[in-house]
Image: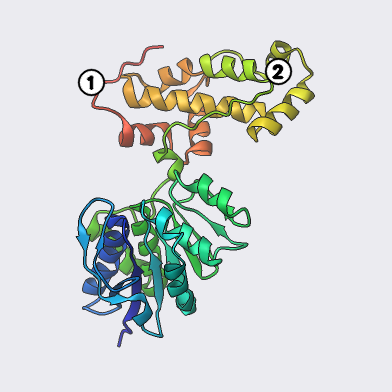
Amino acid sequence: MTIDRLVLIVVYEGVQLLDVAGPAEVFSTAAKINGGSGYRLVIASPDGDAVRTDSGLTLGVDIALADAPARVDTLVVAGGLGAFTAVESPELLAALAPLRNARRVCSVCTGALLLAATGWLRGRRATTHWMACGDLACRHPDIDVEPDRIFVRDDDVYTSAGVTAGMDLALALVEDDHGAELARAVARALVLFLQRPGGQSQFSARLDHPVPADTTLRPVLDTIITDPAADHRLPNLAARAAVSERHLTRLFLQHTGTTPGRFVERVRVEAARGLLEREALGVRAVAARTGFGSEETLRRAFLRVLGVAPSEYRARFRSAQPEFEEVS
């Protein structure tokens, strides 16, 4: 006989509806395919009242957090814009504290901010929506934030990236509980990847380039960003800045957190992203226009930075375009 695992989903004012509905659909679909057993879902709010989601829809709940069962298998703390307010609520954080006894604790999207505020992520690896990774790292420097992960498991604590990544995490939990066959069946039913390719960098907005006050480095960065396809090998960059290669590398590490070569690569990847999304150009032409020189070099850079190949990226994010022209 299959044991029903109690999944408690925590919500609050301003929660993201899909952070709740997505994982709930995965668990409930698994139970249906599994003959009606396997998971029992309970939604809890701080006071037991319905909450207004950040999309404006009202979400009914089952219980107040104080009335949560003593034995919770999986605690899921949903995210959303409301998390930035909820994290300042001593009452909510206090109500979450007893639930640390759950077999596993999970967050979806900015729900990681609530887990962090309770201290559950201290000293752990974690992720959240790419837009909130910097905020999480700034608020909690004791957390090892991994901004490009779809979800992160650190022992019995799980954190996921934004919104639909909660479904990726829920699928992984189903696979842990019931095996890959059931997880595959759920993925097919919900038309999901069993394991999504790439990380969340492929979904992020253009990365903001740092603008250091250092007058030696700033013109170099501007030159790279303005003309990604130019010859930006280290000796040329150092000559432009009138400093040694070693000193220029030190300046890059100090002000951008990366090496000159990696900085140039990321700028070129971003330029290529724009062309792949907007222009009717073949991958070879995109590589030539962004300084990669060959399709293979471009492909390796995309896999390194975004976790997907250029052709896969274009298939997901390009605007409607006519046939691609192989021109350079």
Quarter placement of the N terminus: bottom left
Name the quadrant containing residue 316: top left
Q: Could you classify mark 2 by the number of other residues whose Cα lies within 10 Å: few (under 14), some (14-19), or many (20 or more)?
A: some
Q: Residue at x 41, y 47 (%)?
A: 197
Depth check, front residue: 157 or 202 = 157
Q: Could you classify mark 1 by the number of other residues whose Cα lies within 10 Å: few (under 14), some (14-19), or many (20 or more)?
A: few
Q: Position of residue 154 (x, y in %)?
A: 55, 64
Residue that numbered label 2 is attached to: 216
Q: Is residue 256 left or right of residue 29?
A: right
Q: Point out the frontmost of discs 1 and 2.
A: 2
Depth check, front residue: 182 or 45 = 45
Q: Position of residue 112 (x, y in %)?
A: 46, 58
Q: Position of residue 115 (x, y in %)?
A: 49, 64
Q: Residue at x 36, y 55 (%)?
A: 82
Name the quadrant containing residue 160: bottom left
The kind of residue on which mark 1 rests is: Pro
Q: Position of residue 81 (x, y in %)?
A: 36, 51
The kind of residue on which mark 2 rests is: Thr
Location of residue 241 with respect to 46 vertically, above or below: above
Q: Residue at x 52, y 15 (%)?
A: 226
Residue that numbered label 1 is attached to: 322
Quarter placement of the C terminus: top left
Location of residue 118 with respect to 125 vertically, above or below: below
Q: Residue at x 53, y 38 (%)?
A: 304
Q: Is residue 182 left or right of residue 120?
A: left
Depth check, front residue: 238 or 194 = 238
